[in-house]
Amino acid sequence: MIRREGKVGRGLRPRSVVYTSLDFLVGSGRRKTLLPLSPAMATGDDGHGLKEVLVTFKKCLTDNQEVLLDPYLEGWKGLVRFLNTMGSIFSFISKDVVTKIQIMEEFRSSERKDSYVSLQSMVSYELSNDLVDLKKPGDHPASGCRTILRLHRALRWLQLFLEGLRTSDTDSRTSVLCTDAYNASLANYHPWIIRKATTVAFYTLPTRDAFLENMKVGTHEEAVEMLGEALPSICEVYDVTQALYSQHNLLDLP
Ligand SMILES: CCCCCCCC/C=C\CCCCCCCC(=O)N[C@@H](COP(=O)(O)O)[C@H](O)/C=C/CCCCCCCCCCCCC
């Protein structure tokens, strides 16, 4: 069993729950075809470690600095599998990410799929066809641009959190690392109620040692080394996306 840091999580068995996000995924026949997850994946026991997930993000960037959508979504699916091992208290977060992945996968399986090969082609296509609500929610509440923006902001949280794990002491509290990363990124865009629920959930996180083990990389030192090697790719994907969104004034989409 994974040791927990805080009071809230004591006694929770992270791998024992059939997660709501999976219920959501398999509950609809239409959704099922879009994001099939095996039962093993649903519990995070699909044999893949964090390294494989982070490597997926490396595959996003082309030589022309375009961000390819398919590996981007693959990377997020891998992260959701990790999130699903953290306990049902995180299922409200998991559900939100899964919904956003599904929105994007629908674009990728639609007749406009070629316009959604990369973030660059998506931005160009949606803007030139007036498919983005730029100022307030309107006719396009689930555009690709606004959906990716939410994941993009979350990628910043991931970058900060993993960097915190990598550089912190053995006895550092993951709830503190996670809260610091959250406050410096996503929290700026979330209402009070979400910030509260999220902060409570952070108290149930496993210890730093348990996190490093859960990465399935080897020793703790090897896990830390892997983070040092993998994080630059995440940063690059984040930076290229940030520059793209900034260039088109898309960083505040409703
Ligand atoms: C062995 C180490 C592994 C680490 C693996 C970490 C896996 C992390 C997986 C997912 C990260 C969470 C991504 C959250 C995306 C949130 C997107 C968002 O901001 N959505 C809000 C706005 O969307 P719209 O309403 O405008 O459509 C939405 O309102 C939010 C809903 C839920 C709350 C999201 C809280 C995010 C907290 C991020 C920390 C996750 C903690 C993971 C613990 C490791």
Image (spheres, rainbow, N blue to C red):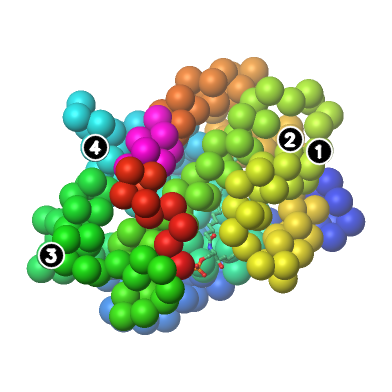
Amino acid of disc 3: Arg
Does 5 sit above or below residue 165? below
Q: Are marks 4 and 2 in contact (CB under 8 Å)?
A: no
* View quadrant of ligand 1: bottom right
**Sequence order check, earlier mark of 1 and 4:** 4
Stretch of the chain drawn in magenta = 236-244
Q: Are marks 1 and 4 in contact (CB under 8 Å)?
A: no
Q: Residues within 10 Å of mark 4 (few under 14, many from 20)?
A: some
243 inside magenta stretch: yes
Is ligand 1 closer than 8 angstroms to the Cβ of mark 3?
A: no
- Label 4 sits on residue: 66
Cα separation, mark 1 vs mark 4, equals 37 Å
Q: Residues within 10 Å of mark 3 (few under 14, many from 20)?
A: few
**Sequence order check, earlier mark of 3 and 1:** 3
Cα separation, mark 4 vs mark 3, equals 18 Å
Amino acid of disc 2: Arg
What residue do we see at 60% from left, 69% from top? 92
The answer to whether any part of residue 79 appears in the image is no
- Label 2 sits on residue: 208
Amino acid of disc 4: Glu
**Sequence order check, earlier mark of 2 and 1:** 1
